[in-house]
């Protein structure tokens, strides 16, 4: 997830699908088993040479202090010369100590679906330590299909399309598809399960309808290939990279495909590529459950007398009470709330709001506590507003400007026809990349079979996570399978794990560090999602020393 903006409410709606690694059908071999890294330099391929030979044309960004450019990459790496491309926004913040500049440090803020260029313009460079900022240009980019990418993903119908739908048909469809009551967090009855499966199928069909031409080309392996083209365009012989959360999947894929192209790599909030879809649900949902327990136990340390209960037991009881109420009837909100059009906050929305507040306790536990108090008194407006984010982006994400850029770019031609996308398409990208990257069962039975174990492991956080995976059942699948990292020749990679991480549990960081040749683990004993950039001086010093001086972290290192 985006560590800078903490994630959107729908991120938890894909609970368990978040922790996914690489795959699209770009002609890559299956990675279910370890393999030797390719020795051929991709830049030597004649059909990729125009992309690798790009020179970025930097201009001032709309935000002062940053420079922006566009990078063109092939839509389909199996057919890079067919003229179909993505054009990706790139932004950089110049090194603050230019006389001692080492090169470029590329980052990914998470997601999948977080726009790196936009995040940088919003001040993401301030998450890096002073030593790293002094020695590196900090570079962010929007991955294929994300943010200002052209084309970009969308799963929403255009406004005119919605308006043209006959009112009678729309009403009939709504009547047929809407089950009695509110969707439960644990669908036990056949009716509830049928409704959940039907809703998931509709969501997948909407994405196929509105982004079909590019859905099979937005996976993590292809994004990692784009990262190598970006490395070349930046003039770097080797990549220096930092990835948060989903960015660890992107970094892992890059290390596997281009192990000898890595100079230094930090993976913070690690995702274990060896877990299958069900194991991921159990891992992540258990992480959220533990974090909510931490909130109940330690609320007073951060929120003081704002806590919604005098004891951990009172806080847990209040949260459970809200879940139960919202399953019977949506919790009331004000007319100007984003949930007003849905009649209030249902149980899934309440669970999302509570879970997302676990990302940065230092920032979110106080407003969460106040919102829970008011929701318990009958007004969930503040609870619904916790996940609200201002829309970012600008009109430069439309297809017109992108097509003009492509006309002067390698291999350019008219992109696949996709509708205009909203300024923030992170929800669609989250779904698209997660579902494409990891295989999911086509039958509903494995999902229902997973409900009881998920309930035992993580309660409603687990069952809601399993149900959310249903969308991927009707999704295009890629070639990647769960696997141990195969990155022979990669230099020591630094994995950072937070012991109280809700979204990427610490055990996955331990596992990922062990899978890398000479992998290093830095443990941050704390709460919240990821560690670097959240103000811990110990973490900052060790990560910066590695990035700048390639200083190794000792076994057992803890902050």
Image (spheres, helix red, strand yellow):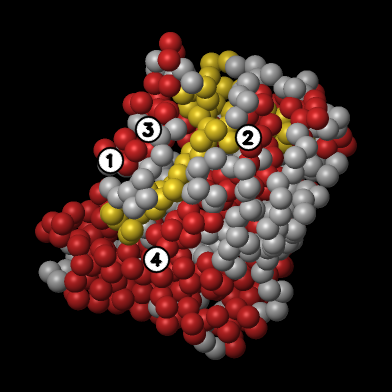
Residue in the picture at 43% in, 11% down: 99
Dot 4: element: helix
Nearest to the observer: residue 539 or residue 191: 539
Residue 545, disc = 3
Dot 2: element: helix
Residue in the picture at 40% in, 17% down: 96
Position of 472 with respect to 507 (left or right) is right
Residue 287, disc = 4
Residue hosting label 1: 538
Residue hosting label 2: 261
| Tag count | 4
Mark found first going from the N terminus, 4 or 2: 2
* Image height of 509 relative to 278, above or below: above
Residue 49 % position (x, y): 80, 27
What separation in Å lies between label 1 and label 3 (alpha carbons)? 11 Å
What separation in Å lies between label 4 and label 2 (alpha carbons)? 34 Å
* Image height of 248 relative to 384, above or below: above
Dot 1: element: helix
């Amino acid at each position: 997830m985006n560590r800078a903006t903490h994630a959107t409410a729908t991120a938890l709606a894909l609970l368990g699908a978040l922790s996914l690694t690489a795959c699209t059908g770009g002609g890559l071999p299956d990675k279910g088993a370890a393999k030797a890294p390719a020795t051929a330099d991709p830049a030597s391929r004649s059909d990729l040479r125009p992309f690798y030979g790009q020179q970025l044309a930097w201009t001032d960004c709309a935000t002062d202090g940053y420079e922006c450019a566009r990078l063109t990459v092939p839509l389909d790496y199996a057919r890079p010369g067919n003229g179909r491309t993505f054009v990706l926004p790139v932004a950089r913040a110049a090194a603050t100590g230019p006389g001692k500049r080492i090169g470029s440090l590329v980052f990914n803020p998470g997601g999948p679906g977080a726009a790196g260029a936009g995040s940088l313009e919003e001040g993401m460079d301030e998450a890096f330590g002073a030593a790293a900022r002094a020695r590196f240009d900090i570079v962010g980019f929007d991955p294929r299909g994300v943010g200002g990418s052209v084309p970009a993903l969308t799963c929403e119908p255009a406004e005119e399309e919605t308006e043209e739908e006959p009112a009678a048909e729309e009403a009939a469809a709504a009547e047929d598809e809407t089950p009695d009551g509110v969707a439960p967090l644990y669908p036990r009855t056949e009716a509830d399960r049928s409704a959940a499966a039907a809703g998931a199928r509709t969501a997948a069909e909407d994405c196929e309808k509105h982004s079909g031409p590019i859905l099979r080309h937005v996976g993590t392996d292809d994004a990692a290939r784009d990262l190598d083209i970006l490395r070349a365009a930046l003039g770097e012989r080797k990549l220096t990279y930092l990835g948060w959360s989903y960015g660890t999947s992107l970094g892992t894929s890059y290390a596997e495909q281009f192990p000898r192209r890595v100079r230094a790599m930090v993976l913070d909030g690690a995702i274990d590529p060896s877990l299958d879809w069900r194991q991921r649900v159990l891992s992540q949902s258990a992480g959220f459950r533990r974090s909510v327990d931490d909130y109940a136990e330690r609320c007073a340390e951060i929120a003081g007398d704002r806590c919604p209960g005098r004891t951990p037991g009172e806080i847990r009881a209040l949260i459970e009470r809200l879940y139960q109420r919202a399953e019977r009837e949506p919790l009331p909100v004000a007319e100007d709330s984003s949930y007003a059009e849905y009649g209030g906050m249902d149980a899934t929305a309440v669970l999302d709001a509570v879970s997302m507040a676990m990302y940065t306790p230092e920032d979110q536990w106080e407003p969460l506590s106040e919102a829970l108090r008011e929701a318990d008194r009958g007004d969930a407006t503040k609870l619904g507003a916790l996940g609200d984010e201002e829309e970012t982006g600008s009109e430069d994400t439309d297809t017109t400007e992108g097509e003009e850029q492509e006309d002067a770019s390698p291999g350019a031609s008219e992109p696949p026809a996709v509708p205009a996308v909203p300024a923030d398409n992170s929800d669609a990208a989250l779904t698209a990349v997660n579902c494409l990257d990891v295989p999911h069962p086509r039958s509903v039975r494995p999902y229902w079979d997973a409900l009881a174990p998920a309930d035992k492991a993580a309660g409603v956080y687990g069952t809601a996570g399993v149900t959310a995976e249903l969308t991927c059942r009707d999704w295009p699948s890629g070639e990647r399978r769960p696997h141990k990292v195969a990155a022979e020749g990669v230099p020591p990679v630094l994995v950072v794990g937070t012991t109280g991480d809700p979204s990427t549990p610490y055990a996955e960081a331990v596992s990922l560090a062990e899978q890398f040749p000479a992998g290093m683990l830095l443990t941050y004993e704390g709460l919240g999602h990821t560690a670097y950039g959240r103000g811990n001086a110990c973490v900052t010093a060790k990560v910066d020393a590695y990035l700048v001086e390639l200083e190794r972290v000792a076994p057992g290192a803890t902050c």
